[in-house]
Amino acid sequence: MRQLTGVVVEVHKLNQKTSWIVFGAICVVFTLISISSQFAARRVTNDMSKWENYMENKEDMTPEEAGKAMGEFLKGLQNEVNKE
């Protein structure tokens, strides 16, 4: 990282402090994106677990009932995605 900021300072003729601030901000943004994606993955996993438990109880469904249940699940999943 130290060499990278040195290269940026030389190539773009920036102050070294400015270079560190920019790279720090980029790291913060990537960290926030990573944390956000982890929360989203856990939420989806939780929804999939609920779906699995629901389907275990409904093994004797007709195809129409299964399609309706899948539609409700996908609608709920879409609502969760749209909340963000």
Image (cartoon, rainbow, N blue to C red):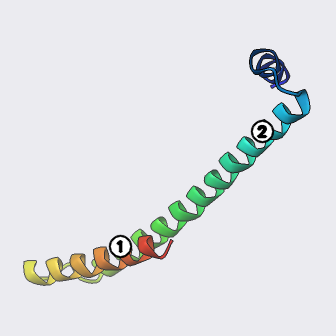
2 or 1: tag closer to the N-terminus = 2
| Residue at the spot 43% in from the left edge and 70% down from the top edge | 81
State the image coordinates of residue 30 (x, y, percent, origin top left). Answer: 66, 46
Q: Residue at x 9, y 82 (%)?
A: 64
The label on residue 22 is 2
Residue 21 shows which numbered tag?
Answer: none
Compared with residue 49, is residue 60 higher up or lower down, i.e. above or below?
A: below
Residue 65 percent across, percent down from the top left: 14, 84
Q: Residue 36 appears at what percent x and percent y? A: 61, 60
The image shows residue 11 at horizontal and vertical percentages of 75, 16
Q: Nearer the viewer, residue 48 or 28?
A: 28
Give the CA distance from mark 2 to mark 1.
36 Å
Q: Quadrant of the N terminus?
A: top right
Label 2 is placed on what type of residue? Val
Q: Quadrant of residue 73?
A: bottom left
Q: Is residue 29 above or below residue 18?
A: below
Residue at the location (83% across, 26% down)? 14
**Where is 32 relative to 2, above or below?**
below
Give the residue at mark 1: 78
Is residue 60 visible from the viewing direction of this image? Answer: no
- Give whichever of 3, 69 is nearer the camera: 3
Between 4 and 74, which is closer to the camera in this rendering? 4
On screen, residue 56 versus residue 15, left or right, reads: left
Residue 19's quadrant in the figure?
top right
The amino acid on which the numbered mark 1 sits, given as a three-letter code, is Gln
Badge 1 crowding class, 10 Å Cα cut-off, few under 14, some 14 to 19, many 20 or more, is few
Decide if residue 61 is on the left or right side of residue 29.
left
